[in-house]
Image (cartoon, rainbow, N blue to C red):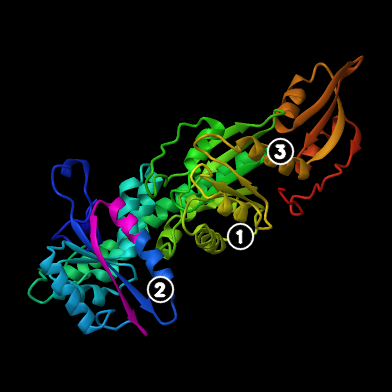
Amino acid sequence: MTYQHLGRERRRLTATVADLEVPRQRAFLVGVRLGRNSSLEVEQSLEELALLTDTAGSEPVDREVFSRPAPDPGLFIGKGQASSVADITKAEDIDVVVFDNALAPAQQRNLQELFECDVVDREAVILDIFAQHATSREGALQVELALLRYRLPRLRGTGEELSQQAGGIGTRGPGETRLESDRRRIRQKITSLEKDLSTLRRQNQTRRHSRVQAAVPIIALVGYTNAGKSTLLNQLTGAGVLTEDRLFTTLDPTIRRLRLPGGREILMADTVGFVRRLPHRLVEAFQSTLEEVRDADLILHVVNAADPDPEGQITAVREVLAEIGADSAPTIIVANKIDEASPTVVRRLVGSGETAVAVSALTGEGTEQLMETLIRWLNARSSTISVRVPYDRGDALAALHRTGEVLSSTEGPNGMDLVVRLPPDQVSRFSAFVSDQTCNPLRSSAEDTNPG
């Protein structure tokens, strides 16, 4: 992946396998403290930007934080501040300057001319990482859409650079410039991608509807990038999902089946990780993927308890959940990486007043308690019924085992007598076999459940 996709063709930020023998580009990071933003917030965000830049394939060699009451319209930072960065880029042979703040297209162009090297912002770096890690067709389409939306306002040209095209079929008429043509083609491509993604979205909705009809609860794993979601999924299900100690390893949703003690089955969906200030255009482009979270019955919010600011990560994730309309779903906090974390931090997270479990997805510590918590959640949204299934209705017997948890079974003269725990919306499916229905002493309303 190169930044020519973002409108720059001179130099590269990222390294591919073919480039391993070439030294990585040298990156200079710029953070700007605006208004009342705290210095700690800026430093934490800049530290994360360094990780993002490294993941994208460049080497962060130096950084600087500036303070301003408001962004400069032309350069974002002040002229004197920009001049000092220009001196550094020349003295330290910097290839790319990475701003932690979002840059307007004009600001980006002005800074590039002044620094005489590439200038990108946080959003461009995240887009580049996403482009490297998208493996499925849907993921690639979503990333391409976000890239084109980012690139469109950054197209530019001068009178000398623009060629004229003859008018005719398929053009807007005589004298259309290359810039206008490029913009038109990008808009057409955006429209085409939106149609393709709309088709995939309908297909995904059909699959989700089928899962709902099968009455198998869906649990979504969400969390900050590199919180350990994929490792936890592997630990619980043996899914064999790719895990690396890198940011944004998972972009495409992975759904695996988990059989709980007692026989109940659930589906677990591993989704894209979040970061602070996740670009809105990425959230928009990944709507189809993020719908797995919005439509989930339960959210497992995986938190890296070993991170210096786990509460900040929780806040960032909740902001994205609110943006996609998934902030009202029942949630369990999973404080992960307790093998690396401070016991004080773990106690603080688990004792926060929310339903929370402390685990190490790497070693498996605490996963039994997590499973017990999931079972309690399932029980709290279930109804217990007694049924009698004739011996010639093996299909109904199999459906009961698949849909619910069989608590007891005895052979009677006219069939199998069972006590079964079922989701409330599935009870009516077996009403013909009910011999005595008993309300679950736990709360059976799906909207009145506390997973703890």
The residue wearing badge 2 is 39
Residue at 63% x, 52% y is 350
Q: Which residues are magenta?
A: 49-70
Query: Which tag, 2 or 1, sits closer to the chain's start?
Result: 2
Query: Which tag, 3 or 1, sits closer to the chain's start?
Result: 1
Instruction: State the CA–CA distance, disc 2 to disc 3.
Output: 44 Å
Q: Quadrant of residue 428?
A: top right
438 versus 44 height, above or below: above
Q: Is residue 186 left or right of residue 304?
A: left
Three-letter code for the amino acid on which mark 2 is drawn = Ser
Q: Is residue 417 left or right of residue 314?
A: right
Instruction: State the CA–CA distance, disc 3 to disc 1.
Output: 22 Å
282 versus 369 height, above or below: below
Residue at 34% x, 61% y is 49
Question: SS for tag 1?
Answer: loop
- Front residue of 336/14: it is 336
Q: Is residue 302 left or right of residue 89?
A: right
Residue 38: give x, y in percent of width and height. 44, 75
Three-letter code for the amino acid on which mark 3 is drawn = Ile
Three-letter code for the amino acid on which mark 1 is drawn = Asp
The residue wearing badge 3 is 375
- Front residue of 298/185: it is 298
Residue 405: give x, y in percent of width and height. 75, 31
User: How many residues crowd mark 3 within 10 Å: few (<14), some (14–19), many (20+)?
Assistant: some
